[in-house]
Image (spheres, rainbow, N blue to C red):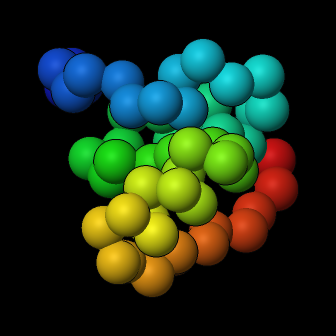
Amino acid sequence: MTTNNRIPNRLANEKSPYLLQHANNPVNWYPWSEEAFQLAKTENKPVFLSIGYS
């Protein structure tokens, strides 16, 4: 049996089943939000968009 000791990311607070299944990924995911776009702009980084369904 394996356990997942990862700390959940920001997606852990979302309602979408698709987003929730990625809440323990080792990626610092942000849900679609002004905060995400403002951070990308401030840090001069591109936005990586993941589109899926559940």
Q: Residue furthest front?
A: 42
Is 13 placed left or right of 18 in the picture? left
Q: Where in the figure is residue 33, as x and y percent of width and height?
A: 68, 46
Is 36 placed left or right of 2 in the picture? right
Q: Where in the figure is residue 9, as x and y percent of width and height?
A: 39, 31
What residue is rendered at 68% in x and 25% in y?
Answer: 14
Of 31 and 23, the residue lying toward us = 31
Of 21 and 9, the residue lying toward us = 9
What residue is rendered at 25% in x and 22% in y?
Answer: 7
Counting labels gives 0
Is 27 placed left or right of 36 in the picture? left
Q: Tell me if residue 26 can be seen.
A: yes
Indicate whether 2 appears above or below 49. above
Indicate whether 49 appears above or below 21. below
What residue is rendered at 35% in x and 78% in y?
Answer: 44
Indicate whether 38 appears above or below 50. above
In which quadrant will I find the N terminus? top left
Of 41 and 5, the residue lying toward us = 41
Q: Where in the figure is residue 37, as x and y percent of width and height?
A: 58, 60
Q: Where in the figure is residue 40, as x and y percent of width and height?
A: 44, 66
Q: Tell me if residue 1 can be seen.
A: no
Name the image quarter holding residue 53. Answer: bottom right
What residue is rendered at 55% in x and 32% in y?
Answer: 11
